[in-house]
Image: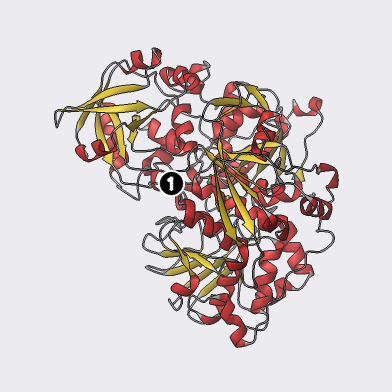
């Protein structure tokens, strides 16, 4: 039987387990990436485990926390740079660009495995790399040479036919995919693109699609590696990295979804979820307060040049604020060179630094109740930094059209005001300048490197072993689709990522600002905190802080209808029990504040039980729960997490 692309790459990287869908396997990892906001924890953990050098091609990027109000972010940058120099990691200096964009340009390779401590790592799937977003501790282990464990995924094929019409672009394709697959129910799946339509898409366009595949919750998304991939790698001076990669003609898929590109129209994700997708024409006319173009989804040369072309000779509508953040230094240099930057400046764009910036909510927040049109990938409530803002996700074309009119506008209408569609030609060679990377020194020189630890760098706290019985309370009850942005908000608190006790003060703040205090009080009284949740708990970001900080507050278990992949692994890594209702309707029988016991839990884990009974003492009801742990994970959850299991403390001070 033939293989699809994902099976081909997995099967050449398996080091533990067998190629059986739904079963846990361990794979060898070729490349790793980290970014600063998750990276400090990754390297504290790497040090705690006691590794002396990296075994992967590892890159450490600084792109998230570049606002630097106070000393904290700068402390983090210095820590990261010194760790990189010590252990032989490539360091991408702040200003060099967003990790995924830069990795795609300079490092991503077809056929290789990549894991990154950021959920949008699958961006590299645009060149045919098997790229997966994971929690930080999993990256530390892989950097040290350990396998990365995942469930062998079931593969969905998205068959692209036809060709995009003018004013419709890659973002509209992935929004269409999100309309079909939604943001929940896709755990255990991966997406592979195929069909004649693939040949009509350049690598940056493919990368927009694989990037935002993260929002569906699949393990990864990938495109074949073909002559278009080769052409892209040539432009980057990396043709030697190319290998051809395609599915066998008789490859088997779990399900096939067909999208006819010729029939696709501009799409928009409405507040407050990336799957609340509509046609732009159906929401046209809504007044816009802000347009923000950038992020790892849509800030390539092609994306910014189409915006520059649309806005040439125009000024942003007086009722809105307009900002652009180029994805990388390469993109910025190239739009400067080709005149696009001038057109943007003349249109009134506020040109931000090449970083995540507004996408993570640390700057350019919208006004109260404001409508913000963004080319980014997430519009969760409050993520922009303004709790009641209404964020819409759109293509660069729709964003630019709306900059001119001041209202949500279908870009196809631009023709009515005399703006002709012009395809953006990619230059033969991209601007290549690796001078903002610091490459590893020879091993002898690394020994002398002193690691910088400013006051913001605190060790990773250690969890206690799991008690034999859990006597707990439902400290909080939340609904469906609670994201890691709800559990562990980023934005203004990002600077505490390396200081867990301080960051933990804000756990669940967007949903219940009293949670952290209440949880700590319970912990001090020896009462276990339990979180009751609906479907798709922990979707969104890979931040392990959404497990680490609740752990610090004494959270012992999450009882949910379903839990998303990366978050589930993070919970296990830090010794929090991921439990799912056997009967989802039991969710209704629990109220916040109910006392809940899970007797004999340790014993159940030891014996490999798949289910356990919990008792709601307040209501006198028994609740059947599935224990969502593999045999491998059980061992370390019993010990209080992976670090205590391996006898490691939480990092040096
Ligand atoms: C995000 O887009 O939510 C982030 C910020 O890039 C996160 C990582 C983080 O929280 O640091 C992600 O996607 O994993
Ligand atoms: Fe940065 Fe936004 Fe991409 Fe996350 S989604 S890596 S915050 S640009």
Q: Is residue 291 above or below residue 595?
A: below
Residue 144 in sight in this render: yes
Front position in the image: 584 or 543 = 584
Q: Which residue is mark 1?
A: 184
Dot 1: few (<14), some (14–19), or many (≥20) neighbours within 10 Å? many
Q: Residue at point 51% right, 25% down?
A: 650
Q: Residue at point 32% right, 42% down?
A: 534
Q: Is residue 275 above or below residue 653?
A: below
Q: Residue furthest bottom?
A: 417
Front position in the image: 248 or 185 = 248
Give the quarter of the image for residue 602: top left
Secondary structure under the numbered disc 1 in the rendered image: loop
On-image quarter of the C terminus? top right
On-image quarter of the N terminus? top right
Marks counted in the figure total 1
Residue 539: x %, y % from top left: 44, 44
Picture colour scheme: secondary structure
Front position in the image: 564 or 347 = 564
Q: Residue at point 53% right, 26% down?
A: 23
Front position in the image: 318 or 223 = 223
Residue 451: x %, y % from top left: 65, 32
Is 260 displayed left or right of 432 in the figure?
left
Residue 610: x %, y % from top left: 37, 21
């Amino acid at each position: 039987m033939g293989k699809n692309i994902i099976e081909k790459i997995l099967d050449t990287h398996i080091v533990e387990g067998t190629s059986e869908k739904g079963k846990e396997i361990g794979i060898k990892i070729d490349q790793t990436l980290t970014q600063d906001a998750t990276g400090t924890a990754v390297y504290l953990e790497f040090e705690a485990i006691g590794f002396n050098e990296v075994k992967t091609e590892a890159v450490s990027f600084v792109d998230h926390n570049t606002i630097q109000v106070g000393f904290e972010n700068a402390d983090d940058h210095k820590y990261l740079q010194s760790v990189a120099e010590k252990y032989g990691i490539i360091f991408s200096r702040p200003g060099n660009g967003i990790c995924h964009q830069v990795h795609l340009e300079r490092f991503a390779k077809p056929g290789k495995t990549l894991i990154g401590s950021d959920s949008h790592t699958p961006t590299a799937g645009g060149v045919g790399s098997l790229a997966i977003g994971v929690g930080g501790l999993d990256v530390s282990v892989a950097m040290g040479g350990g396998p990365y464990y995942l469930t062998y995924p079931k593969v969905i094929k998205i068959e692209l036919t036809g060709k995009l019409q003018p004013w419709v672009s890659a973002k509209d394709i992935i929004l269409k995919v999100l309309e079909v697959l939604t943001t929940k129910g896709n755990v255990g799946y991966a997406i592979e693109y195929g069909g004649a339509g693939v040949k009509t898409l350049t690598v940056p366009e493919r990368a927009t699609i694989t990037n935002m595949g993260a929002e569906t919750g699949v393990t990864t998304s990938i495109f074949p590696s073909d002559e278009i991939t080769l052409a892209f790698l040539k432009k980057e001076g990396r043709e030697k990295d190319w290998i051809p990669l395609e599915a066998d003609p008789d490859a088997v898929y779990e399900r096939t979804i067909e999208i006819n590109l010729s029939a696709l129209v501009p799409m928009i994700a409405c507040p407050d979820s990336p799957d609340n997708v509509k046609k732009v024409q159906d929401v046209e006319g809504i007044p816009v307060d802000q347009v923000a173009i950038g992020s790892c989804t849509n800030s390539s040369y092609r994306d910014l040049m189409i915006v520059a072309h649309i806005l040439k000779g125009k000024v942003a509508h007086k009722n809105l604020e307009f900002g652009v953040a180029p994805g990388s230094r390469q993109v910025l240099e190239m739009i400067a060179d080709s005149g696009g930057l001038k057109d943007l400046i003349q249109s009134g764009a506020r040109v931000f630094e090449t970083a995540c910036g507004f996408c993570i909510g640390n700057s350019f927040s919208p006004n109260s109740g404001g409508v913000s049109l963004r080319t980014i990938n997430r519009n969760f409530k409050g993520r922009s930094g303004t709790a009641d803002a209404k964020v819409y996700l759109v293509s660069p074309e729709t964003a630019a059209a709306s900059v001119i009119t001041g209202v949500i506008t279908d870009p196809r209408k631009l023709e009515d005001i005399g703006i002709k569609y012009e395809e953006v030609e990619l230059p033969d060679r991209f601007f290549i300048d690796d001078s903002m990377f610091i490459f590893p020194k020879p091993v002898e020189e690394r020994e002398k490197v002193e690691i910088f630890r400013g006051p913001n760098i605190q060790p990773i706290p250690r969890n206690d072993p799991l008690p034999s019985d859990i006597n707990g309370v439902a400290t909080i009850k939340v609904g469906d689709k609670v994201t890691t942005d709800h559990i562990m908000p980023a934005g203004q608190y990002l600077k505490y990522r390396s200081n867990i006790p301080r960051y933990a003060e804000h756990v669940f703040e967007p949903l219940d600002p009293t949670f952290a205090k209440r949880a700590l009080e319970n912990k001090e009284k020896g009462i276990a905190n339990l979180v009751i949740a609906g479907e798709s708990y922990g979707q969104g970001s890979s931040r392990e802080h959404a497990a680490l900080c609740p752990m610090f507050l004494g959270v012992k278990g999450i009882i949910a209808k379903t839990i998303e992949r990366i978050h589930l692994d993070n919970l296990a890594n830090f010794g929090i029990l991921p439990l799912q209702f056997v009967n989802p309707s039991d969710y209704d029988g629990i109220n916040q504040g109910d006392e809940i016991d899970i007797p004999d839990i340790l014993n159940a884990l030891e014996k490999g039980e798949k289910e356990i009974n919990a008792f709601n003492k307040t209501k006198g009801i028994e609740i059947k729960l599935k224990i969502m742990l593999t045999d491998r994970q059980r061992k370390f959850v019993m010990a209080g997490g992976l670090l205590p299991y391996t006898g490691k403390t939480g990092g040096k001070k």
